[in-house]
Amino acid sequence: MKKTINLYKTIAAVGCLLLTVVACEKDFSTIESEIEGIKDFTTAGKVFPTVMYDKKLEPVQTNNLTSNLIGIYTDETYGKTTANVVSQVIPNNFSFDFGEDPKVESVYLTVPYYSRIVGTDANGNSIYALDSIFGANQNIKLSIYENTYFLRDFDPGTDLTEAQKFYSNANQTINFDNYQGELLYTSESFLPDNSATIIRAINQETGQLEEVGRGAPAMYLELENDNEYWDNLFFFNSLNPEAQPELSNANNFKNYFRGLYFKVEEPSAGGSQGNLSMLNFSQANIVITYSSITRIVIDDSGNTEEVRDNAEIILNFSGNRLNTIENSNDVKNIINTATSNTDLENGDTNVYLKGGEGSYGVIDLFSGNMIDDNGNSVSTVDYFKSKKGKWLINEANLTVYVNQSEVNNSDQEPERVIIYDLKNNTPIVDYYLDPTISTTDPLNSRINYSEKLKRDSNDNGVRYKFRLTEHVSNILLRDSTNLKLGVFVTTNINLTQNASVLNVPDEKVPTGSVLSPRGTVLHGSNPSVPDTKKMKFEIFYTEPTNN
C-alpha cells in the first residue's frame, strides 16, 4: 500500500510539473501559431542599453548564518578584512548527574573546516584538502575568551516580537573587547590545518590521553582550565552541583555562561597578511571530560582505593552566533570613493564588488532610449514591450567584464557572482530553473544561469556571463515590471537566504555574499568605457518576416 501511495505522489508531482510547462508554453502560442507553417522567419540578436553603477552596503546582518568566517584576509585590491566570531554554547541535555567528587580532566573544542577527501596514505588513512580557505595562509594570533555580553534572543525595540539581529559592525556598537572574560586559549601562530583530527580520550585504566579515533579536519584545540575554571563553571566545588538553577535549562545557562569570543589579530611580530577560513559552527562542540568516584576497592594490602570513571559534558554551538566583519581604512576609502560619485544616468566607469560589509553593482536593464525600427528615438523598455506577440525570446545574456588594470591578484578573484532581484530580494527566475544545481559542489552549481569566471591564458579574470532568458521573457510576455537587479560576489551560489542591512529595511543581501571576503572590479556602462569592455545585454529572438 505504501508503494502505491508513493507512486500516486510521484504521478501527482509530475502532473503538476507538466501543467506548469503547459501554462508557460501557452504564452508563446500566438507567435508559435504564426510561425508554424510559415517558412520565412528570421533569428537575430539585438543589444539593449543597460546601466550599472556602484552601491555601498551598510553593516550587514551576521547572525543566523549557516557558517562563519574567522581570520584576517588581505585583498591586494581593497585591503584587510578581519572576521571574529561570538557564539553562545548550550549543553546537549540538562539531566546532569555528576556523581561523587567530580573533577574536570580535559576540555576540547572542535569546529570543523569544510574539507574533502583527496586520497589515502600508506596506512589507509584519509588525506584531506580544505575548502573555503582564503588569503595568504600566514600566521594570525587567535585568542578565545569567555564572552560576558548577553546575546539576547528578541529585540526590545520591537516589544520583543521580533528576533534580535546582530550586524557586522558589532565590534563598534557593542565592542566585545570590553566583555572579555577568562582567556581559554591563545596562539600567536594559528594556521588552518588539513590534517585529520586526532580524537583523544582519557584511558580509564592508565589515566592517560590516548588516540581513540580520527575525523575530518577541524579547529581542534584544548582549552585551558586555569584555577579550575571549568570545574567552577559547573559548580563541581560545591555541594549538589546538579541542583544549581543555572544548570536547569537553556535560558538560565545562556544568561549564566554567555559563550565564547573568538578574536583574531596580527601576530605581535607583525608583517603577516593573515589567513581566513570558513568554519562549520553548526557542527561545533566543546567536550568536557570529567571524572567522579564510582566505587571504592580494597587492594591486596587491605588499603582502600577510590576508583574514578570518566564522563562527558557536551556543549553545542546552538544558540545565538554572529560574525564581526571589520574592514581596514583602505577598504572603506575605496568603497566610499567609488559609491560617492555614482552616475545613475549613464552608469559608473568602474563598479566595485566586495563581499561582507562591502559593495555591489546595481543593474538597470532597458535603460534610457534607443532607436526603433523606424529610426526614431523611443523608450528602450517601450520598444522591447512593443515586440510582444512578435518576438519569441530564444536567449538573453548579460555579460560584465573585469577591469584587469584594477584587480591586482588573479588568485583572489571571486569565481562566482550572483544576479539578484533587488525589489523582491530573491534570485531571478532563471536561477531556479537551472538544472545544474549541486549541493555538494557549489563552485559548479547553477552554471547555466551564472557562468564561472572566464579567465585568459595568464589566469586573469576576463568576464562573468548570466542568462536572463526567462526573466526577460516574463517582462515581454507577462508584462512583468522591469525591476532593478543587483550583482554580488558570493562564496556559495546556493546560499540565497536574506540578510538584513542596518537601518535600510527594504534592502537585503544574499548570505552567500555576506560570507565572501573576496572582491573584484568590473567595467561599468559609462560612455568612457571602451565598447569591447562595456557591459553587454543582448537578446536573441525569432521573428516572422511578415511582421
Image: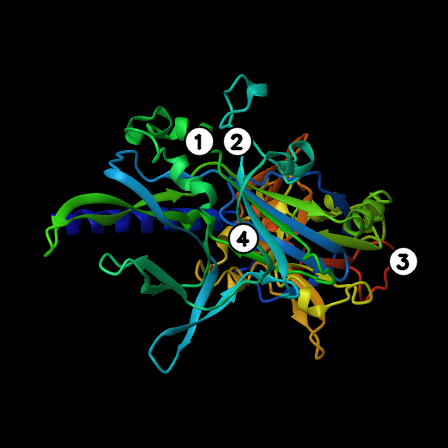
**Gap in Å between the C-alphas at discs 2 and 4?**
35 Å
In primary-sequence order, the first of circles 3 and 1 is 1
- Residue 84's tag is none
The label on residue 528 is: 3
Distance, label 1 to label 2, CA atoms, is 8 Å
| Secondary element type, mark 4 | helix
Cα distance in 3D space between marks 2 and 3: 49 Å
* Residue for badge 4: 431
Residue at the front extreme of this rendering: 301
Disc 1 on helix, strand or loop?
Answer: helix
Q: Amino acid at mark 2?
A: Leu
Disc number placed over residue 151 in the picture, else none: 2
Residue 296 occupies which quadrant of the picture? top left
The kind of residue tagged 1 is Lys
Identified at 10% across, 57% down, the residue is 300
Picture coordinates of residue 521 (x, y %)?
76, 58
Going 43% across and 47% down the picture, which residue do you hit?
282
Residue 311, image x, y percentages: 27, 47
In the image, residue 530 above or below residue 316: below
